[in-house]
Amino acid sequence: MRGLLTRRRALWALGAAGLVGLGADGARGDGIERAGVPGPRTPVDAATPVPSPAPTPTPTPTPTLRPAPWTAEPITTAEQPVRRLTELVPAPPPNTIALTIDDGPHPAWTPRVLDLLAEHDVQATFFIIGEQVREFPKIAKRIADSGHQICNHTMTHPTLSHASAKKIKREIVDAHDLIAQTTGIVPGFFRAPGGGWSPRVYDAIAEHDMLPIDWAVDPRDWARPGVGAIRRSMLGTKAGDILLCHDGGGDRAQTLAALKDVLPKLKKRGLIFTPL
Ligand SMILES: [Zn+2]
C-alpha cells in the first residue's frame, strides 16, 4: 500500500478542511486542493499617500462546487480501480451516483455538455487530457469555474498498461501540473485511458495522492452505437454507480442527445449526482 491509506486520509482531511471553510468564496470540500489562492491582502495604511488609484481587480467567477455529501472514513486500496461509490466510502448517502466525463476539453462538445449539466443542475466529474488542456485552456477553466470536479486523464491519452515507469510518470506529472496551473485545481483522482492499469500506474498515482477510478456503467458512447443504445445503458445506472461517458475524442452528438434524455429521467428516479 506504500502509505496510500495515510495519504488518502490526509487528502480527505483537506476535503474536510474545505467543508469547514465553506463560505463566501465557495471553498471546495471534495478532497481537491485549490492552487494559487491568494491570502488576505494587507490593508493600505490610511496615512500612506497613494499616488494613483489601484486598478480594479477583475472579479473571479465563484465556483459553486458542492462537497461530496458524506463524512465517513473513506476506504480504498491502490491495487485496483474504484468502480462504485461504496469503494470510496463505506456508506455513501442513499441514491447517489457519479457522472464522469472523459477526454475533454473539446471546443465543440464540452461547452454543450456544460450547458446541459447547468440546465439540469447536475454536477459531474471531468477526466481531462493534458494536451487538450494546453490547446483549450479557456474551456478547461470553464469546467472548473462551473463547479465541476476536475481529474487527471494523462497528458496524451496513451495505453499505460505496458508503459515504462518513466513514461507513466511523465504522462501523469505533466498533466497534473498543467491542469493545476490552468484550472487552479490539483486533481485528487486519476483514470487510466482505456482502463490500462498496472502496478506501475498505481505506484505513480499514489505518489501524487491520487486514487484510481474506473466505472460501473459503460455505455460505450465513444464507439457511437446509436443514441438508443447509449440511453438504455445509461438508464441502467443504479445508486452507488460511477457512470462513464465522453465529451472528447470524436463526434459526441450521440452522447449529448442521450444525456439530454437521461439526466432528467435519472433525477426523476430520485438519483442524486455527486462528485467523487
Ligand atoms: Zn479516455
Image (cartoon, rainbow, N blue to C red):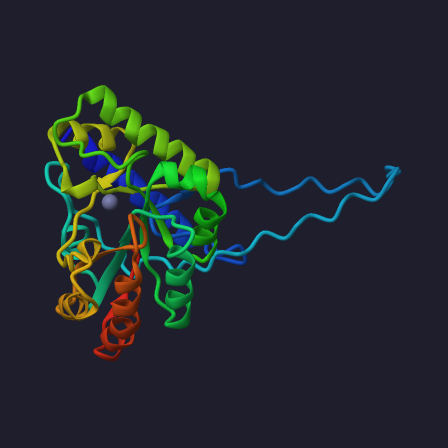
In the image, is residue 139 above or below residue 7? Answer: below
Relative to 36, 222 lies left or right:
left
What x and y, as percent, mark residue 174? Answer: 36, 29
**Is 16 or 174 nearer to us in this picture?**
174
In percent of the image, x 29 and y 29: which residue is there?
171
Occupied quadrant, residue 272:
bottom left
What x and y, as percent, mark residue 225? Answer: 16, 61
Residue 184 in sight here: no
In percent of the image, x 29 and y 69: which residue is there?
257
What x and y, as percent, mark residue 70? Answer: 27, 59
In percent of the image, x 66 and y 50: which residue is there?
58
- Tell me the quadrant of the picture where the N terminus can be found: top left
In percent of the image, x 34 and y 51: which residue is there?
30
Residue 159 in sight here: yes
Q: Quadrant of ligand 1?
A: top left
Total labels: the figure holds: 0
**Is 37 or 75 nearer to us in this picture?**
37
